[in-house]
Image (cartoon, helix red, strand yellow):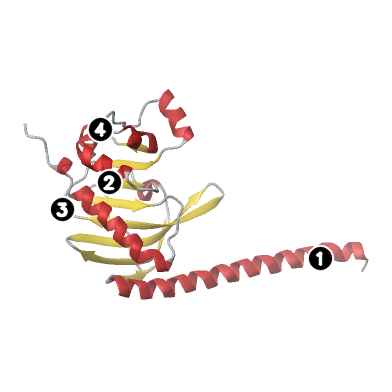
Amino acid sequence: MSSHDVLPFIFFAGLLALMAGIIAASVHYAKKRTRELTAVAQQIGLRFVGNNWSGLSLSSQHKVSLLQRTRGRFSNAMTGSSGGLQISLFDYTYPAGKSSITQSVAVFSQDHPLPPFALRPENFFDRIGDAIVPSDIDFDSNPEFSKRYLLKSPDEAGTRRLFNPSLLTYLEQFQTNWCIEGTGSTLIIYHGGRQVSPSDVPAFLEETSRIARTFFGSDGLRKPVA
């Protein structure tokens, strides 16, 4: 066998070895993350259900949430309740072009129906799109909020009531922008494309819980007097 014949074989074998190594490392990382999150769930008072979870029951009237718009996979789920809130934390993986995105998601439910809305950081292309087809809900009273966030809803009046000046000012105080979605009585909170490390899950739960309580406690959830 000549060197010209051997070189393609070596390249192919090396490529297979590299792929096998990547897969093995990925499996090892996934198992390690699951073990660590199992311990964290016990630490923060939630029940770890892992991948044996049926997911969420979300309102089908308005598909404003990422979880409703994408066909993703839940993993490392943990559930429980605290302070009147039903809580679910999990990893969510969904397709994005030829690759996929995995991020940590916190979901809170309470007996307060929210207007359907989707809030996320606003980018350059959002501003161009909104200039062509206006859809972003802005607030003259809080220009900093309107500059940083893209807010969309099929119920603009209800969403404007919810996002009262107090809530807008609260959201302006964050150093990093959150993605927050409301559907039915469920509030969904995450950082786009960010998977929280197991050691940071307690802080993630604490901060998202504060956000959820602020939303559910907003005076804007009260129906206007006729």
Q: What label does residue 53 carry, if any?
A: none
Count neighbours of disc 4 (C-alpha within 10 A) and say few if under 14, some if 14 to 19, many if 20 or more: some
- Cα gap from disc 3 to disc 1, whole angstroms: 63 Å
For disc 3, the marked residue is 111
Query: What is the distance, in whole Å, between disc 3 and disc 2 at their CAs?
Result: 13 Å
Q: Residue at x 22, y 37 (%)?
A: 165
Among the two numbered marks 2 and 4 on one chain, the one whose residue lies closer to the N terminus: 4
The N terminus lies in which quarter of the figure?
Answer: bottom right
Up-down relation of residue 208 to residue 226 (above or below): below
Pick whichever of labels 3 and 2 is earlier in the sequence: 3
Of mark 3 and mark 4, the one earlier in the sequence is: 3
Q: How crowded is mark 2: few (under 14 residues within 10 Å), some or many (20 or more)?
A: many
Q: Where is residue 37 in the image (x, y as percent from the top left)?
A: 39, 71
Q: Is residue 83 left or right of residue 20?
A: left
CA gap, disc 3 and disc 4:
21 Å
Structural distance between the alpha carbons of marks 4 and 1:
62 Å
The residue wearing badge 4 is 156
- Please name the amino acid that badge 4 sits on: Glu
Residue 63 seen from this side:
no
Q: Is mark 4 on a helix, strand or loop?
A: helix
| Pointer 2 residue | 182
In the figure, is residue 122 to the left or right of 214?
A: right
Q: Residue at x 55, y 52 (%)?
A: 99
Whether residue 145 is situated above or below residue 8 in the rendered picture:
above
Q: Which numbered disc, 4 or 1, marks the residue closer to the eye? A: 4
- Disc 1 target residue: 9
